[in-house]
Image: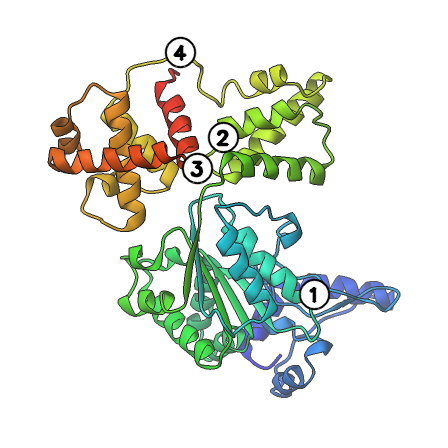
Amino acid sequence: MPNEFARDWVESRFSDVLREALGSVMSADVAVRVVIDERAADEGADAPDAGDSAVRTGGRDATTGPAIEADGAEKIDPAGLNPRYTFDRWVVGPHNEYATAIARSVADAPGTAYNPVFLYAGTGLGKTHLVQAIAHELFGRRPRPRIKYVTCEQFTDDFISGVSEKGRIEGFKQQYRTNDVLIIDDVQFLAGKQGTQVEFFNTFNALYEADRQIVLTSDRQPRELEELDDRLRSRFGQGVVVDIGRPDVETRIAILRRQVKVDGDKVRDPEVLEYIASQVSSNIRELVGALRRVVSYASITHTEVTLDLAREALKDLLPPVHTRQVTIDAVQSEVARQFGCHVSDLRGDKRTADIAYARHVAMYLCRELTEASLPQIGDRFGGRDHSTVLYGVNRISRLLTDGHDRQLHDLIQVVTNRLQASR
């Protein structure tokens, strides 16, 4: 290995694997020792296809060298990537069409038109799937670029390891700054880590100035990451910032159909998928989870997957049909959950487009589902006057009336059903 950081990293993670593999090939007990040799760095740079692997792999990292099959063919095994998170298994709809176009452009020509790319979305809406699809696509290319995919947590752990012992920080820098493509998931978790933020800033600059592709994901857009250093937020927003919304009901049905095909399940009744899609809209993860619950329930009970069975399987997950009194607090809590924000955001002074939209939806639902007056609603939204509430209510009413925003109509229906259900 070229330095102490790489040596310690390989020894701590792969000593047993290497010993077993070599012992199997040589039919003898083998001792493995990892040594430092500066020539290793030069060899890796001169011959990337020979294995630019060990320094840049590990944990949930996706950089890897080739594995050789018995017939001599090269098989790419990008460590840390979910094999299901590819473009082939990605369902495109109105909610993610732009994000998909950006991701494919990055995969086609990294480091050119769109750099950096900052992708944000709520939990379970597919941002990890999309950025890993970029990595999978690039791993299939020749010549293959040096790619690194990690979570923010892994970046932080590697940085802490790098500074914990003298001389290892240079290995950390080489591990991150020599890549052609760097993908880091969930950068919002940099909050509160000042030392890591400084190193992240320096890593970002080094890659950006070298025209290397940077792809970042978060649960919020850059300007809403108030816990991060202003310099970082500025860097994050200087490229392409794109969001993934919630899929409409048609797209959710398409996602379920794709999942049925991938899993090889037998769901013959189309009403089953329509029912699940109409009941679960919060995120894709819960949507697929509901489908698998129905399929497993049918398997256990040795019955066909029918609409009645789906209702029975999901009865403790979905609200029953009889109604209850709805309160302003309940509306705010449910809307905040659907939009992936906090109730305090709806009541506070934030005026970003996403928060303002969510606030107007909540005001509209308060007007429709509660007995509260406009002044009473305004009071529960941070002391806003009745004209502000009326503006929000009218805005959502117009969007629903013109009929173009089917996703909004679907959202209103789902939230209303949840709020009116007793548990």
Q: Residue furthest top?
A: 322
Q: Which residue is mark 2?
A: 280
**Number of residues whose C-alpha sits closer than 10 Å to that of mark 3, classed few (under 14), some (14–19) or many (20 or more):** many
Distance, label 2 to label 1, CA atoms, is 35 Å
Of marks 2 and 1, which one's residue comes earlier in the chain?
1
Give the crowd class for mark 2: few <14, some 14-19, many >=20 residues within 10 Å: many
Q: Residue furthest toward the front?
A: 402
Q: Nearer the viewer, mark 1 or mark 3?
A: 3
Query: Sequence order check: which comes first, mark 3 or mark 4?
Result: 4
Residue 368 located left or right of residue 76? left
Q: Residues within 10 Å of mark 4 (few under 14, many from 20)?
A: few
The earlier-in-sequence mark between 1 and 4 is: 1
Q: Disc number at residue 140?
A: 1
Q: Is residue 342 left or right of residue 375?
A: right
The numbered disc on residue 322 is 4
The type of residue carrying mark 2 is: Val
Label 2's element?
loop
| Pointer 3 residue | 407
User: Could you tell me how far apart the alpha carbons at marks 1 and 4 are, in whole angstroms?
Assistant: 53 Å
**Do we see residue 144 in this rendering?**
yes
Q: Indicate the secondary structure of the residue bearing disc 1.
A: loop
For the N terminus, the quadrant is bottom right
